[in-house]
Amino acid sequence: MKNKTVLLFLLLILAEYLHAADPKFYIIRSQETRANAAYLNILDSEFFNGLRKKFPCASSLSNADVNIMLDLERQKELLGAGDMDQLSNIAEAMKSDYLVSLSVTVLENTTTISAFIVKKGQDKVISRTVESVPTDDAINAAKRVAKKLIDDLYQYNSQLCREKTWTGTIKIEQHTNEKLLNADDSGKPGGSVKSDLSVQCEVNNDVAQCTVNYSDQLTGSEGNATTVASCTCQTDVSISVFDGKTSISVGMVKAYGTSSGSLEGGGGFSSEVTIPLGGWSVDAAIGTNTRSDSSSGFVNQGDLTITWSLTKK
């Protein structure tokens, strides 16, 4: 009992060094012999390649890897005879979601190839297949057994490789200050216009929830006008990262507010306004920290600055 506790502790230490993406598979192979080695390797390879092809998000660890820390005989003591609770404990210890058992036995001219998969937290096998064939057909049988496991796993496809979505923030700032010429007489004083735009969006997949604040102030010889508008509004967003470059598109929003001012000679005005803003886009920008599943950075487009920090998970 003490040895088993120590071995489980060692497995937990090893698991801390695993940084693989979900879901995780732990593969146990039967003891390798001269007679079964080739067929066991084919069975393992076919399952591994099929897993990566059908479920690219999956990662796997085999007892061959664990042997870096555990010698085979002590590991066999831990694995025991395949008790279901014990197998579930191993999957738990290795921080794995699925435990896969691969076995090949060669007896005279007959080879038996068997395999099963246990899902952590369940007390039943979710896939099992066994073939006993003439040894000269063992290679094909190993391939068939591996394929059967992969086919059975496919019913869990939506759980295994959930579609990842982008989350994070996109910020848009624009500040302008322009001088205007007098349209009637260039020798006379003109005017000026100053505007400020702030957009802060929380991204969830293809939707952005944005807080928008906009203002502009027009000052001229014939009067002045001030517009203030804002909204908490939703718009569409698309994000893609390819070859280290990020492309972002944020759709249109509508800000609501008032425009008011005074005219030369007296009098004033005030009215409600609706101001369409956007869309904004970033095309193949090189961010400061860009990978296939994360991107952050900023771009300047004249007086417009777009800043983003996004993660795909």
Image (spheres, rainbow, N blue to C red):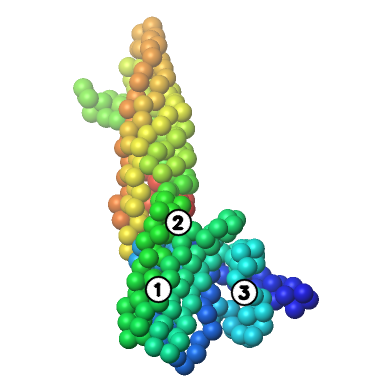
| Label 2 close to label 1 by CB (< 8 Å) | no
- Whichever of callouts 3 and 1 sits on the residue coming sooner in the sequence is 3
What residue would you read off at disc 3? 81
* Mark 2 burial class by Cα count in 10 Å: few <14, some 14-19, many 20+: some
Residue 115 in percent (x, y) is at 47, 71
| Label 2 close to label 3 by CB (< 8 Å) | no
Q: Nearer the viewer, residue 116 or 3?
A: 116
Residue at the (32%, 86%) spot, across then down:
136
Vertical position of residue 156 compared to residue 229: above or below: below
Q: Nearer the viewer, residue 161 or 205?
A: 161
Residue at the (40%, 73%) spot, across then down:
131
User: How far apart are the two marked residues, 2 and 3, measured between alpha carbons?
Assistant: 28 Å
Badge 3 element: loop
Q: Nearer the viewer, residue 159 or 197?
A: 159
Q: Is residue 64 visible?
A: yes
Mark 2 or 3, which is nearer the eye? 3
User: Given the image, on which type of amino acid does mark 2 rest?
Assistant: Leu
Residue at the (54%, 84%) spot, across then down:
31
What residue would you read off at disc 1? 131
Instruction: Kindly indicate the quadrant of the structure image that contains residue 188.
Output: top left
Residue 19 in percent (x, y) is at 54, 67
Residue at the (45%, 35%) spot, across then down:
209
Instruction: Kindly indicate the quadrant of the structure image that contains residue 214.
Output: top left
User: Given the image, on which type of amino acid does mark 1 rest?
Assistant: Glu
Vertical position of residue 307 compared to residue 75: above or below: above
Badge 1 element: strand
Residue 232 in percent (x, y) is at 46, 28
What residue would you read off at disc 2? 160
User: Given the image, on which type of amino acid does mark 3 rest?
Assistant: Ala
- Whichever of callouts 2 and 1 sits on the residue coming sooner in the sequence is 1
Left or right of residue 76: residue 261? left
